[in-house]
Amino acid sequence: MGSFKGHVLPGTLFLVVGIWHVWSSVVRHASNPKSFRVRVWNPVPGFNGRLKYLELYLIVIGAFIDMCIELLYSTHLKFFINGVLNPSHMNDFEHSGMLLMFFIFGLIALLSEKTSFLPLPEGALCLIAATAFCAEYLLFYFHSTSHKGLEGYYHLILVLLIALCILFIVAGAFIPTSFPVDLCSGIAITLQGLWFYQTAFTLYGPMMPDGCRLKENEISCHSTGS
């Protein structure tokens, strides 16, 4: 089960990266359609290049902070009970594994762009990013937390949005000159960020539907007319 803050933090990361991707894609295509190339990340222009890698730093630092919250704060360091993983914190362990994949992607992209140790083409970076989204997809598809009722419908939408992210990012690796593919990948990431915000306000905030309530880490709903 999640929380309001637990959805707003990753939602903000996805939303910022997604909007920046959409904006950068449109600007690059409008500037020179003939030389347009798909990018899995977009540098920030100006400021003498000081902010060029801001998006990658945001991914790395944001994923690391969120991973520490899930793995260290939420679990209270109670990883094991009687020699096995603490079943009451499986949700936190799963989220940490997903965030680790985005953290690794950000590190690999930084090493590829800033050093000569791991030079990778843009297509390879697209596939690595798609791998991180695949980990997220598997997490929410085979989640140990039982999502039923209203919460289940929300998470079904999330799984579909993650699938779109994977589809368009992989397509970008094989169709590197396609503006629609690059644009759609940014839109899919943005929609995922909006999903986290909508879920935070609807399931854990002031927009809870009439007849529904959060009780003992479960959301139960009943007809207001009954």
Image (cartoon, rainbow, N blue to C red):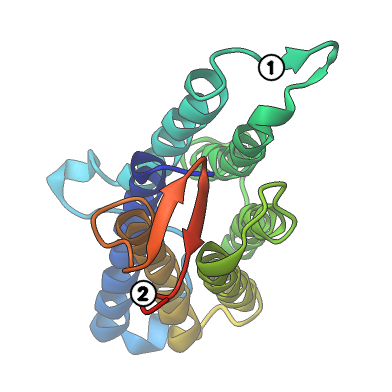
x and y percentages locating residue 83 in the rendered image: 85, 12
Looking at the rendered structure, the secondary structure element under dot 1 is loop
In the depicted structure, whether residue 113 falls above or below residue 42: above
The amino acid type found where label 1 is placed reads Phe
x and y percentages locating residue 143 in the rendered image: 70, 52
Foreground pick, 10 / 21: 10
Foreground pick, 12 / 216: 216
Task: Name the side, left or right, on which 136 lies relative to 70.
Answer: right
Looking at the rendered structure, the secondary structure element under dot 2 is loop
Q: Which mark is residue 224?
A: 2
Which quadrant holds the N terminus?
top right
Instruction: State the residue lying farthest toward the right.
Output: 83
Q: CA distance from mark 1 to mark 2?
A: 41 Å
Q: Is residue 42 visible?
A: no
In the depicted structure, whether residue 149 falls above or below residue 226: above
Instruction: State the residue lying farthest toward the left.
Output: 47
Q: Quadrant of residue 85?
A: top right
The residue beneath circle 1 is 79
